[in-house]
Amino acid sequence: MTLQPLENLLSSRLRILVATFLTGVSGLMYQSVWHRYMGILLGAEARSSALVIAIFLLGLSGGFFFWGHFTRKIKSRTRLLKTYGLLEVLIGLWGILFPVLFLPTRALSIMLPLSFIADLGLTMLLIFPPTFLMGATIPLLTAILPSDETEVNCLHAKIYGHNTLGAFVGILLSGLVLIQAVGLIGTSIIAGILNILAAMLFFLNRLEGDIQAKKPLPWLENNFPRSSIYALVFMTGAVTISMELMWIRLWGLTVGASTLIFPLVVSVFVAGLALGSLCMGQISLNKLYRNLFSGLIILMLIFFTVPYFPLWVSLVRVSLTSSKADFFIFQLITYGMLFVTLFPFLFFLGRVLPLSYALLKKDLDDYGQQCGLLYFANTIGTFFGAVILSYFLLAWVDFDTIFKVNVGLLALVALFFFYRGKRFVLLALAGPLVLGFLAFASWNRTFHKEGIFRINTPSELHRHGPFFIPPTGYFENIFFDDGVTLTVSANKYTATNELAIFNNAKSDSSTTGDYSTLVLAGILPYFFLSKEKEVKAMVVGLATGVTAGLMGKFEDVSSVDVVEISDSMIKAAGLFADDNFHLTENPKVRLHEMDAFKFMQRTSDKYDLIVSEPTNPWTSGVENLFTPEFYQSVRDSLDDEGIFLQWMHLYEMDEKVFATVVKNLRSAFPDITLFYLTAEDDIAFINIPKGARFGKFAPRRFQEGVISLIMWKIGIPMLEAFEVLRSMLPAELHFITTYWQTYKHDLENPTISFHALLDFFTKSQVRTDQLIPRELSRKLRGEEPQKMAALPILYKGFSENSNYCERKNMAQRLGRVPFCPKVMDLILNYQRFTSGETLNLRMQGYAGLRRENFLAFDPGFISKVLGDIVEGGNQKNPAATEESLSLLFEQVMLEGQWNLLKTTTKTLRHKGMITPERQKELLKNADDLRRIDIIL
């Protein structure tokens, strides 16, 4: 007996397959959104990836089992369609309400003990219910669609393929476009609307008739035990998801661990699985054997590409310019490289599940249930792959070993099926290859120990072909760990004995080049603090541990809580003991393996000093540490008189990202001041108002033994020298947030990671002296008495010790010392201003001192210069007179003295020293300055 004919069969199927495609789109949109939300909840990006995917698939497996059994109870096709439509509505409502449901769950997480079980439970609470409902798609539609018994196997493959193809579109659409454009809430709402639209297609469908009649269905006759078929889909599910999570990490080591990695890698996997199923063609046992053999061989071949992929990507990078257009070309080419590498393996593996369904004996009474049981086994396997192979196993072994474990598991089931199917040729070919692979295959991980994705111009590295891995003679790798959260590497450079630590192959800091940054990040807030004793400090981010270890040595500091999300970073800390002041042995220093958000929400302590030193904002997950919510958490954890320092860089960043960070920082700390930590591009924001002087205990603290030694190492001889590093004041930073376009960036609108990644590619650079129009800068800054008081002290000190900044002395110092390069310009300008032989030199000195605000506006000096020009214009050297006039006009305009500019131009015109045209131009400038003055 065949199934009853369907009314408008083809159009009904088409609508259902379109709806199936839409549910796939929404499903992976949810996964992308939930991945970001769970990153907020759990902190670690890799952990959230593993748990979101694991629970997503666990929910599906439960759904497959339950709804597969459900198809045995319901005979009416119409009722099943209505039921499925209702489920899609419920999924859509859950998606729309997810941001609301997330809030109490996040509050609950603060009350629970820190453990993997707690993280797993919270993830299940949010993700299991909707994914359980999503698990109805395959078994219900497989039961509904076939018109007769001959169509069951092929229609099942089409349903699976269309749903997975929709998932491919969904992950790319959400990960690359929607989250950036409308945020997490907007993306979740759009996904929910898609579910409800799909539900309408099911509600309005007029398919009629019953689906059940006891009659055997076509199947691939075989001698495989049913349990072995379930084992096959279990293993292929485990291997697929383990490889997916591994490649998320490996691709981050290859191109840089940005937020683009997750959607790009996941999309390749779902595309391969979808197209493999859709391109099935005729179902046969030989096809199963060929696909298993091909997938196994290709997986082993993929293993050997991993060490060379960073070089291949780098060859593409250095062939392009650092323009925005080439950024998108680079992403497209490298995505294509990833796709071409992984797609064949996924294509063949994507056929195993529908082929396995054809292996099962079934009749019209239970074919929906059999589908559910098969997918239940497959998704239980994916849960195993996500949690065991890709999470817990990383605590003991690295990715190369896990890759081999995956090959071994796939080989185990493939060889069993070859043996039972009497495919002895395949068995003879695959067996020795697998044994040889497991015994001898290995990776050279040089490019994972020190990434090359920052290189943007051809070098010697690129001249030796695509399979060249340089010897590591110039550095010794002293630590390497593919941790649960990050891949961490520590290298010692033989020429300098410098140590550096790498986070996902990106340098986090070094003990020499970054020395001034690391030590000043701890010293500056300590000097500004007014509290004398029992100072409690917190450091966000460990890296080399220099900042935290140094703060643990401060005499007035009683405790330092170091919050670091990576267990691997903490393991490596002891290797930097000679540089980080033996941090791990200091009882005052406590290391917490935890997300900074979670730590601050859990602790009731109030801190006197908080230092935040996250890595670059383009790095996945780090953008959360530049949000208003994070800064408010810092504010809540800080004592009323406490000092907060935020490290920041100016390299690989543009003005808009910089202004966005400043805007978010000011939302919690309206008064912030910018200090330079190096001579070029490392800075710090400190929550102090304009003109704030060091605390009264700073002179004593400056003399502490460890600080005194450090001050010599970085070339800062006195407290007044820090005024050279003070750069931008609260009024200027406030102006920047209104003058420059900023992005809406918060936890639910994570936008700056993409823009920062673009800046990373284009090698953008922020110049602080170009952030504010020159004619506004001095008006905004006003006078800084503490700088003017420091100037004569600095001049006297360097007059008595003139060789302090000479090259031979500088060579003994560490890092990119910020003080000497800046103070030498300052001293030179002071000498020019006070004793310059010519008027022009004195004007240049005045301009330099005013630019750095070490001198107040001096109308008497300006008037004297004007008088000297008028009375003693150089008849013999008119060019010198013209230069003096240009310098004079520039200074008057920069001071915003529009009235003085008018009177000066009239005087000079009267003396015949400027033309009417130039007078007209200058008077226009005066009017412009007057309007600016009114606006300010």
Image (cartoon, helix red, strand yellow):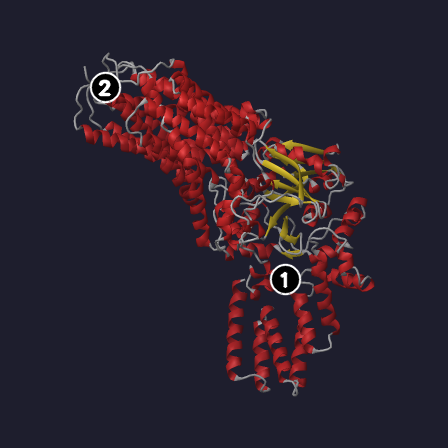
Q: Nearer the viewer, mark 1 or mark 2?
A: 2
- Name which quarter of the figure residue 183 lies in: top left
**Measured from the top left, where is residue 853 in percent x and y?**
66, 63
Q: Are marks 1 and 2 in contact (CB under 8 Å)?
A: no
Residue 157 higher or lower than 552, as above or below? above
**Measured from the top left, where is residue 560 in percent x and y?**
70, 36
Would residue 435 be seen by someone viewing this image from the given angle?
Answer: yes
Quadrant of the frame with the N terminus: top left
Residue placed under numbered mark 1 in the picture? 782
Q: Dot 2, how many residues are within 10 Å of its Cα: few (below 14), some (14-19), or many (20+)?
A: some
Residue placed under numbered mark 2 in the picture? 149
812 lies left or right of 150:
right
Residue 930 higher or lower than 597, as above or below? below
Would residue 410 be seen by someone viewing this image from the given angle?
Answer: no
- Name which quarter of the figure residue 63 lies in: top left
In three-dimensional space, the C-alpha distance between marks 1 and 2, rounded to whole angstroms, equals 85 Å
**Measured from the top left, where is residue 148 in percent x and y?**
21, 20
Q: Amino acid at mark 1?
A: Gly
Residue visible at 83% across and 63% down in the picture: 800
Q: Dot 1, how many residues are within 10 Å of its Cα: few (below 14), some (14-19), or many (20+)?
A: some
**Measured from the top left, where is residue 290 in percent x and y?**
37, 27
Q: Amino acid at mark 2?
A: Glu
Earlier along the polypeptide chain: callout 1 or callout 2? Answer: 2
- Name which quarter of the figure residue 271 lies in: top left
